[in-house]
Amino acid sequence: MVLKPYDVKHVNSGSIGEQYCKLPEQERATFDIFIKTVKRLYPEYMTGIEKIERGSIQYLCNMFVMKKELFFEYSEFCFAVLKEVDRQIDHNEMSTQGLRFLGYLGEFLLSIFIFNLKAKGGYRIKELNGSYILSDTPVLHPRLSYWGYWVLSKLTFGAIKKRYKQKRKALKQIRHIQNK
C-alpha cells in the first residue's frame, strides 16, 4: 500500500527534476548526482529511474506498507543509494534546510522502487488517498465549540477572555477552510 501518486504538473512543474530545484535550497547538481548514482548502482531499476528523471509522477511522503521481504529489498536499495549520494555531496556550506536533500531523494527512491515493482508484475499495489492535517487541536463539532467559546468569552475577563476569543477565531478559520 502506498499513497496515490502525485503529478508535479499540479504545482506548475514540468518534471520531477524541475520540482526538486524549486524546493528550498536544493540544487539541480544534487539531483543529477542522484540520478547518475542510481543508474550506476542499480541499472536493473532503469524503468523507474527514467520515470523519475523525465516524468512528473511520484509517490510522496515515503509512506508504505509492504511485506517484510519487500521492505528489506527496498531498504537495501534505498540506503545504498543514499549513502553513496551523501558521500559525493559536500555538506560543509549547507544550511539545515539544504541538508534535507536526502529526505527528498528518499521519496524519489520509493517512487523508483514502486515503478519497478509495477513493471515486473506479480505484485498487488494498492494506492490510497492521503490526508493533510491542518491542526492538532481536536474539534468534536466546530459550530458547537465556536458558540461555546463565544459564550465563555462573554462570561470571563482578562487573559482568560482573550484565550477564548483566540480559540473562537481559530475555529472560525478551520470552518472557513472546511467550507472551501
Image (spheres, rainbow, N blue to C red):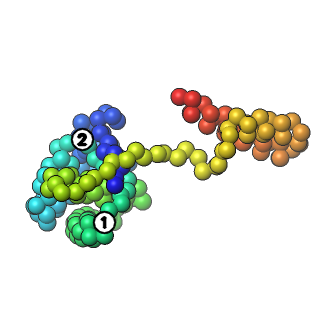
* Residue position for label 1: 67
Other-residue count near label 1 (Cα within 10 Å), few / some / many at <14 / 14–19 / ≥20: few
Q: Nearer the viewer, mark 1 or mark 2?
A: 1
Give percent across and percent down for residue 116: 18, 55
Give percent across and percent down for residue 26: 32, 51
- SS for tag 2? loop
Mark 1–mark 2 Cα distance, whole angstroms, equals 27 Å
Residue 84 visible? The answer is yes
Q: Is residue 49 left or right of residue 82?
A: left
Find residue 147 and report its image quarter: top right
Q: Is residue 39 left or right of residue 60?
A: left
In the displayed structure, would residue 77 be above or below residue 175? below
Q: What residue sits 16% from the left and 62% below the top? A: 37
Find residue 7 and report its image quarter: top left
* Residue position for label 2: 56
For the N terminus, the quadrant is bottom left
- SS for tag 1? loop
Q: Amino acid at mark 2?
A: Ser
In the displayed structure, would residue 56 be above or below residue 93? above
Other-residue count near label 2 (Cα within 10 Å), few / some / many at <14 / 14–19 / ≥20: many
Q: Amino acid at mark 1?
A: Lys
Residue 39, label in figure: none
Q: What residue sits 30% from the left and 59% below the top? A: 106
Q: What residue sits 36% from the left and 60% below the top? A: 65
Residue 25 visible? The answer is no
Give percent across and percent down for residue 153: 83, 38
Q: Is residue 77 left or right of residue 179?
A: left
